Image (cartoon, grey):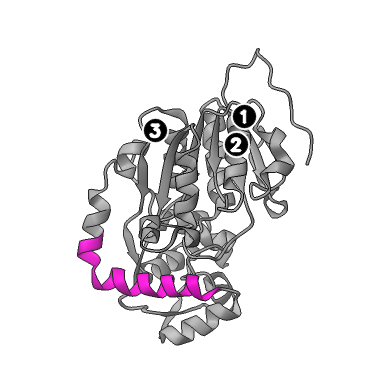
Amino acid sequence: MGGIKPVTNASHARLRLLTAVSARKDAGSSPTGVVGRSLARQLLDAGDRVRVLAEPGQVAGWPDGAEVVEGSITRPLECAEVFSGVDGVFLAGAVPTTVRDALEVARGAGVRRIVVLSSHGPEYEEAYPPETWFWLAVERAVERSGMEWTHIRPSAVMGAVIEGTYPATGSDWPDTVRGERVVREAFLDGGHYPFIHEDDLAAVALAALRADDYVGAVLEAVGPPISTRSRVASIAGAIGLDLAAVEVTPEDSRASWRRRGWPDSGIDVTLYALEEYGARLAELTRWTLDQRPAVREIIGRPLRGFDDWAVENAHLFR
């Protein structure tokens, strides 16, 4: 790990530490690099200082002004000095086996606040033995750390396809659109999936790090359900080409995603959500709109749509 720049008393800007890990396809895993880079830009724009602890595959692409240190939050004792002088941590990619070590080091270094990038629905883990918990284990450890905390439980992130993280839906579209101008997916006609733009998710994290309003809160950073067909249409419009859309069976999608390295856990949740959100669209849309504080209230502006995301990332599909 590289040396850490000393913190001087002359600087009054608070130092925030962001962590980023390599892409994970497990159910509920967000793209930590995609979200983290957006958050770094927003923090720097707000006048904060930013340090990043990034695994080897995530060290590139951070904005100018961010101090990037190679290492892993999953091995916190190897990079304890990264917490020096830090006021708040955006904890993304921590794992239950070592999260307590990370929190002890952070507390010892004087960190005041931990903002957890969690997953949507960790409360369902309570039905199973604690030794099987993942997201809930991380959240509970943070709650018991003695530091201020906020948990962010996001829906799927639009930019997951950039990094190759959960969900599986859309993960092969850059290849099939570039090569064949076609999308093949299960539940094409009725399927829906809730997505949030990475800039909106990062803006929620910005608020949790910089404001006191959300200390001790669980923030459901969920975007509205978006139909699969409308996502295809957004991409077609962004690249200015007609795309063929072919509905396949769930088992066909499962086989395709398995070939791309997706675990059954991530596939199962993806297929379940596509079908469930389609079948209960009005109910689940209402649940999203009823969340308080709403994402729009937290970030002070309307959420960004998939059309915006497709235009910004059209190069992925050309």
Lateral position of residue 83 relative to residue 151, left or right: right
Residue 215's label in the rendered image is 3
Q: Nearer the viewer, mark 3 or mark 2?
A: 2
Residue type indicated by callout 1: Gly
Badge 1 is on which residue? 108
Residue drawn where x is 40% and y is 60% of the image: 125
- Looking at the image, is 92 positioned above or below residue 44? below
Q: Residues within 10 Å of mark 1 (few under 14, many from 20)?
A: few
Mark 3 → mark 1, Cα distance in angstroms: 20 Å
Packing grade of label 3 (10 A; few <14, some 14-19, many >=20) is some
Q: Is residue 81 magenta?
A: no
Residue 63 position in % (x across, y down): 63, 39
Q: Residue at x 53, y 48 (%)?
A: 35
Magenta stretch? 263-284
User: In the image shown, does 260 or 245 lie closer to the viewer?
Assistant: 260
The label number, if any, that marks residue 104 in the structure image: 2
Tag 2–tag 1 contact (CB < 8 Å) = yes
**Residue 294 vertical position relative to residue 262 in the rendered view, above or below:** above
Q: Is residue 274 left or right of residue 254?
A: left
**Mark 3 or mark 1, whichever is nearer to me:** 1
Q: Amino acid at mark 2?
A: Glu
